[in-house]
Image: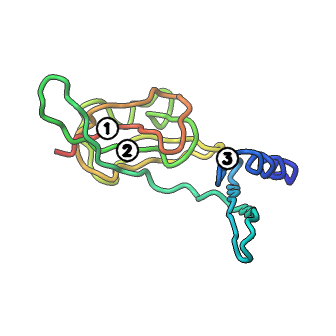
Amino acid sequence: MKEKTIRKLIKLVEESNIDQLEITSWGRKVRITRRLNSDNGHSEQLMMVRNNPAPAAQPAAATAISVDSGTTDAEKKYVEIKSPMVGTFYAAPAPDAPPYVTLNQRIGVGQVVCIVEAMKLMNEIESEVAGRVAKIMVENAQPIEFGQVLFLIDSA
């Protein structure tokens, strides 16, 4: 991130009522934190700027959630498969190929469920759980964000 941009962000934190600002851009993370220091009974502001690289792409995260079925009071347990990166979602390895997974298909741990294209690199996303594909949350060739839910898996 450019120094000019960082200076603008510092000024924004100084003029606002926030204590911390964190921005990730182009693979770099900048965190600006305001602390109050009272060593001599004086209250002064210290600004801390950290310019760290953003974390590298990690395996797809699987998190258990509860989704209301709508027909009964019972809740069904689903597991989310989330995108480990920003990119473009592809359901199949090629435009004319069948999709990796379909609705209601049973999948196993380590099975490829989709591809996320990021910076012209094709990253295969593997399932960390076994179960049935309950819902596909994104459409083919749709841009996706880091942490966006791609699939809901019924692990029961």
Badge 3: few (under 14), some or many (20 or more) residues near its Cα, within 10 Å? few
Of all residues shown, which one is farthest toward the right? 4
Q: Quadrant of the C terminus?
A: top left
Marks 2 and 1 close (CB-CB < 8 Å)? yes
Q: Dot 1 lies on which element?
A: strand
Q: In x, y percent, where is residue 100?
A: 38, 37
Question: Which residue, given by chain and number where applicable, does mark 1 sit on?
Answer: 152
| Residues at marks 3 and 1, CA–CA distance in whole angstroms | 39 Å
Q: Is residue 15 above or below residue 30?
A: above
Question: Which residue, given by chain and number where applicable, does mark 3 sit on?
Answer: 17
Amino acid at pointer 2 = Ile
Q: Is residue 129 above or below residue 137?
A: below
Image quarter of residue 143: top right
Of all residues shown, which one is farthest toward the top? 71
Instruction: Name which residue lies at 48% across and 44% down.
Output: 147
Q: In x, y percent, where is residue 26?
A: 71, 48
Q: In x, y percent, where is residue 21?
A: 66, 51
| Residues at marks 2 and 3, CA–CA distance in whole angstroms | 36 Å
Q: Dot 3 lies on which element?
A: loop
Amino acid at pointer 1 = Leu
From the viewer's side, name the closer residue of 1 and 100. 1
Which numbered marker is on residue 81? Answer: 2
